[in-house]
Amino acid sequence: MFPSSCDTFVALPPSTVGQRIVFGKNSDRPCDEVQEVVYFPAADHGAGEMVECTYVKVEQAPHTYAVVLSRPAWLWGAEMGANEHQVCIGNEAVWGREDASDEEALLGMDLVRLGLERVDTAQKAVDVIVELLEKYGQGGNCMEDQSIFTYNNSFLISDRTEAWVLETSGKHWAAERVEEGCRNISNQYSITTRIDREHPEMREYAKSQGWWDGKAQFNFAAVYSYMNTARIDASGSRYCEGRKLMEKSKGHITAETMMEILRDKESGINMEGMFMSMGSMVSVVPRDPFPAWSALLHRNPGPREVNDPVKKKPRFQSKPDRKHPLFLKHEVVAAIIETTKERGSKITQNMRQLEKEKMADMEKYLTSGIADSTLIVHLFSDTIEEELKVYSKS
C-alpha cells in the first residue's frame, strides 16, 4: 500500500468570480515532518555555476526569479509555491507500471522549485521540467528516513492565462493544457486521451513494453497506470471527490471556496493519520497583469546542522530536530484544539476571524492595487505576529 497524499486544484474563468485564477494545494506528508514557508529573492548567477539540489547538482540558470515556497525542511525543493510572475506549481506522487527509481536524481519537489525559479509562464515551466527530467532523471528517497519511499511525479502549473497538467513516468511524460474551467490532480494519472504535448518516445516505449497495442486510442492513464479509468473515476477516490467539490462551486469559486475544499475531511482531502496535511497553499492571480512583488517576506527555515545527515552518505543515519519556534507553537495549539473543546473552539473561532480580516486586506490589494509598497513588505511576518497574539489571548 502506497501512502495516498496531496491534492492540487486550479480554477480558471468562467469558474471563478471575476477574471482570476485560483490555485490551491494540500501537502500531505509524514505527520512528524516539519514543513516551512520560505522566501528566496531574485538573483543573478555566474557562467558555469552549479546549484546543489537535494541529492544532485545541476547547471544554474543565469537569473532566478523570486519565489515563495512551502517545503519539507530537510530538502532543497518544494511541495508547492509561486514566483514573482504569478506562476504557481504543485506536485503529486504517482505510481504506475514504470517503477519509481531509488537511484538519486532530481526529486519531483526539486523540479517544482527549479521550475518556479526559471520561468515566467506555465508553458515554459513544462519546458524546463521536461528538459531537466530528460537530462537528470527523477529518483531518490522522498522521506527523511532510512526506509525508501519513491514515486514518479505529476504537476499542476498555472499562470495568469492558463494551466498545464504534466504527468511523468520515469523520463516519459504527457501534458494537458487547461484554458478554462476547473482541473485537479491527486495520486494517480489523470491525463487520458486529450494530450497536448508528450515525450516523443512515450507511445513507442509503451508499445515495446506490451502496455499498448498501437491500434487502440492512446489513453495515457490507462496505458501507464496500474488502475483503469473506471477506477480513476470511482466515486470513493479523492481525485473524484475533489472534482465534485469544484464542480459544485463552479462559477463562483474564490479563495475562500478553495480553502473550504482543502479543509474538507470527509473526502480525505484534508488528510489525517500517519500521512496528514502538513501545509496548504491558496493563490489568487488576476488575469490582468499585476505588478511583480518584491516584498521581503519573513523567512522561517528550521535549524540546519553544519554536517546535515541528508548530505552525508550513507544518508539519513540520524535525524536532527528541525522544529523551528513557530512550528513548536503550532504543535502546542494543535494539541489544545484536539483535547480541549471550549478553548480549542475559541482558538479556531479567533483564527477564522483573523483569516477573514487578512482575506479582506488581500482583496483590497487585488482590486485597488498597491500605492504604498511598504504596506506589504512585512505582510507575512506581521500576520504571524497577529496569529501568535490570537493564541495567547485564547
Image: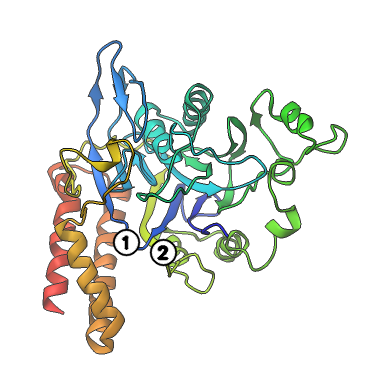
User: Is 313 positioned to the left or the right of 382 in the image?
Assistant: right
**Residue appearing at x 45%, y 60% in the figure:** 258
Q: Residue at x 64, y 27 (%)?
A: 199
Quarter-of-image position of residue 232: bottom right
Residue pushed farthest bottom? 342
Q: Is residue 358 visible?
A: yes
| Numbered label tally | 2
Residue 213 appears at what percent x and percent y?
85, 35
Q: Is residue 349 visible?
A: no
Q: Please tell me which residue is depicted at 56% across the width and 51% down the height of the picture.
A: 185
Q: Nearer the viewer, residue 209 or 374?
A: 209
Q: Mark 1: few, some, or many residues within 10 Å (few <14, many ≥20)?
A: few
Q: Amino acid at mark 1?
A: Asp
Q: Is residue 110 above or below residue 241?
A: above
Q: Secondary structure at mark 2?
A: strand
- Whether residue 140 sits left or right of residue 383 in the image: it is right
Query: Residue shown at 65%/29% (left/top)?
Result: 198
Decide which of tag 2 and tag 1 comes sooner along the chain: 1
Mark 1 lies on a secondary structure that is: loop
**Mark 2 surroundings: few (<14), some (14-19) or many (≥20) residues within 10 A:** many
Amino acid of disc 2 = Met
Residue 202 pos. (x, y %): 69, 29
Where residue 234 sits in the image (x, y, percent)?
70, 64
Disc number placed over residue 225 in the picture, else none = none
Where, quadrant-wise, is the N terminus in this rendering? bottom right
> Which quarter of the image is occupied by the C terminus?
bottom left
Q: Which mark is residue 276?
A: 2
Spatial CA span between label 2 and label 1? 9 Å
In this figure, which residue is indicated by the disc labeled 1?
A: 32
Left or right, 361 with respect to 203, comes to left
The residue furthest top is 47
| CB contact under 8 Å: marks 2 and 1 | no
